[in-house]
Image (cartoon, rainbow, N blue to C red):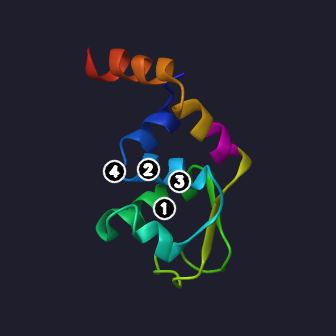
Amino acid sequence: MADGRLMRVISCPGAVELLDELGTGPRAFDELRRIVPRRLLGPALRVLAAEGALRRSDAGSWDVRPAGDALFSLTGDGGRLADELSDLDVWVAVYDRYLNG
């Protein structure tokens, strides 16, 4: 349940918020900037991409700021990850395993 992939996403500020928002459908980069602070957005997008949870409409490096109208969406794995994070039992397991010793 609380595997390394899940912990990498949870431990990245802004990543869970992005998963939640993108779970409702694709969003433009400018829309995502309203949800997650700018300084957190780039790293959170890169973590989700590295975990195979995210794709974007334009080509290019994840280290370069995308155009404001570039669309981001969840992959199948990203949708499953978002579903997993919507389960309270997952959060309890994370707390018990990593935060409660």
List x then y, in percent, for residue 70: 60, 78
Q: Residue 17 carries which label?
A: 2
Q: Which mark is residue 28?
A: none
Cα–Cα gap, marks 3 and 1: 12 Å
Q: What residue type is labelled 4?
A: Pro
Q: Which of marks 4 and 2 is in front?
A: 2
Left or right position of 73 against 14:
right
Which of the two labelled residues, at mark 3 and mark 1, occupies the earlier sequence position? Answer: 3
Left or right position of 91 against 95:
right
Residue that label 3 marks: 21
Cα–Cα gap, marks 2 and 1: 11 Å
Residue that label 4 marks: 13
17 magenta-colored: no
List x then y, in percent, for residue 36: 37, 61
80 magenta-colored: yes
Cα–Cα gap, marks 4 and 2: 8 Å
Task: For mark 3, give the secondary structure.
Answer: helix
